Image: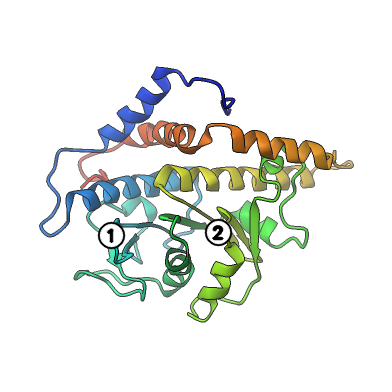
Amino acid sequence: MTAPADATAPAATEGAAADAYDACNTGVAPPQGIPLHEWALRIELAGLYRVVHRLGWCDLIFNHITARVPGPERHFLINPFGLRYDEVTASNLVLIDLDGHPVRPTLWPVNAAGFVVHGAVHRHRDDAHVVLHTHTREGMAVACKAEGLSHDSFYGAMLTDEVAYHPFEGVSVHEGEMERLAASLGPRQMMILRNHGLLSCGPDVPTGFFAMWLLQRACETQCDAQALTGPPEILSAPVRERTRQDRKRSRIDPRVARTVLAALRREVDAGLTVTTDYRR
């Protein structure tokens, strides 16, 4: 799945990623008042919403994926509250400030819980340009276990000492929780919100997504393994640490992360119609 640090990725791999990302540029000019760099990010983020919907990670109209728009203001894009993930498009994403207020006129409200969770990370982490939060069944199940994430699987071992935890404080609508949530995350890229769900972040869309994919996959494996009878196979601490280090030395970010997301976007794009195209 991952290439060794000294390996050279095939040119075809890079090409596949570039092709998928280039295909998201429809050549349509951005709406008036939206800079080109923001429009490109809107298309990329809307595409990720469709991928997450296809993977089944969405929770009706709830949860969010946010992306910070380049600039000193720290404005970030969030989905319109009330739409399903497969209804999100580049143009209907809402640009908000760090206080949760829309920067431009919009017909859509902003979910307070989305602002608290995502705004906390965008406020306090200069490197976290993209934040994903999910309520998947497996993620919530692991979040409800006192021991948290198991590191006795292929994916779980990769995440040894890589996952932060934040205690449950109720529905995340109180701004007072923002600093505590950011402090719980610290410098890590992944966090389990106790009794709640999963969170990941990254410097760009593919990296943030792939961090969530790894965490989600580890949770899925754990739930399946714990549902089987028989004693678990426990990995030793040295093996867990070696697996973690191998992942950190591999070229997951950004090349593999970009290629993985591009592959999923090609699958989404193949079924788009004029009325379902997110690139508008």
250 is higher (above) or lower (below) than 136: above
Percent of width and height locating residue 191? 60, 58
Q: Is residue 55 left or right of residue 137?
A: left
Mark 2 to mark 1 CA distance (whole Å): 30 Å
Q: Quadrant of residue 218?
A: top right
Q: Nearer the viewer, residue 187 or 38?
A: 187
Q: Is residue 152 left or right of residue 207?
A: right
Amino acid bearing label 1: Gly
> In the rendered image, which quarter contains the N terminus?
top right
209 is higher (above) or lower (below) than 7: below
Residue at 52% from the left image edge and 57% from the top image edge:
134
Badge 1 marks a residue whose secondary structure is loop
193 is higher (above) or lower (below) than 262: below
Residue at 54% from the left image edge and 77% from the top image edge:
177
Q: Quadrant of residue 66?
A: bottom left
Q: Is residue 64 left or right of residue 192?
A: left
N-terminal of the two: label 2 or label 1? 1
Instruction: Find disc 2 in the rendering and name its residue.
Output: 135
Amino acid bearing label 2: His
Q: Nearer the viewer, residue 125 or 94?
A: 125
Identity of the residue furthest to the right in this view: 231
Q: Quadrant of residue 81?
A: bottom left
Q: Nearer the viewer, residue 212 or 271?
A: 212
- Near mark 2 (Cα within 10 A), the count class, few <14, some 14-19 or many ≥20, is some
Q: Nearer the viewer, residue 241 or 103?
A: 241
Residue at 43% from the left image edge and 31% from the top image edge:
259
Closer mark to the observer between disc 2 and disc 1: 1
Badge 2 marks a residue whose secondary structure is loop
- Near mark 1 (Cα within 10 A), the count class, few <14, some 14-19 or many ≥20, is few
In the picture, the disc for residue 71 is 1
Percent of width and height locating residue 213? 54, 43
Residue at 10% from the left image edge and 57% from the top image edge:
32
